[in-house]
Amino acid sequence: MKTILITGATAGFGEAAARKFVAGGWKAIGTGRREERLKKLQEELGDAFLPLAFDMRDVGAIHRLSDLAPPWGEVDLLLNNAGLAPPTDPLAETDWERIEAVIHTNVTGLVGLTRALLPKLIERKGQIINLSSVAATYPYKGGAVYAGTKAFVRQFSLDLRSDLAGTGVRVTSVEPGMAETEFTIVRTGGDKEASDRLYAGMNPMTSGDLADLFWWLANLPPHLNINTVELMPVSQSFAGFTVTREG
């Protein structure tokens, strides 16, 4: 039986992935800040799910994950899903505390956890799936910090793949567009109406869509590596240039 470790398993993509992989016969370790949600998910999924409540900014907790006792320590797939975004205000108007939390979660925590689990992943010829975003490629107003972190994740994935050449470990950067989850609600400080307006009438992707993608990636033949996957709902496309006119 294989084991997946999923960060950010309390909602959205991570929660859906936990359900998908446990249903497929895997064991799943789920991390997140909201302990009550992890316990509820454990009640649903049973002994195949191990909840670990901690913040991705807690470097000590991240490093302790490398000491998990068997069988939970035998991680075959690391899904780096946890992520935050500051409000879409211009950089000068965004609180430093929000900026710092995003960078520590999306970059520092992701790198620290990946590094801590690499020896086991190399030993088991495992797999790493990192959640980037289309924001890593396509700029938008108010996205400087979030998009910058996701561009880091994309490039980190590609360079990590180079570091791991010859080990059998697969690395993929998944770069989704608009998907309706709690992400926007959290980003706006709990404004569900703002989230509803954003996704109204556009048939966005769902957490289940991404969980299906993760499952497909995990079950490819071991000699295949998907370097990057960029996906959007059909109703989303690329924005035009913004032009500021004088007079």
Image (cartoon, rainbow, N blue to C red):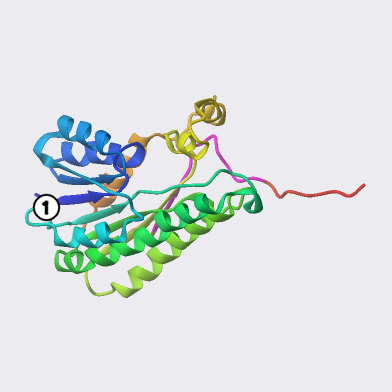
Q: In x, y percent, where is residue 165?
A: 28, 74
Residue at 78% x, 49% y: name it. 243
Instruction: Return the residue at label 1.
Output: 72
Quadrant of res 168? bottom left
Q: Please name the amino acid that badge 1 sits on.
A: Trp
Left or right, 31 with respect to 87, comes to left
Left or right, 110 with respect to 45, comes to right
Quadrant of res 207? top left
Q: In x, y percent, where is residue 107?
A: 41, 60
Q: Residues within 10 Å of mark 1 (few under 14, many from 20)?
A: some
Q: Residue furthest left?
A: 70
> Principal SS element in the magenta part?
loop
- Which of 230 and 148 lies nearest the eye of the viewer? 148
Residue at 29% x, 38% y: name it. 15
Can residue 2 be seen here? The reply is yes
Q: In x, y percent, where is residue 154?
A: 44, 60
Query: Start and end of the magenta stretch?
Result: 228-239
Q: How many marks?
A: 1
User: Please, is residue 247 above or below residue 209 in the view?
Assistant: below
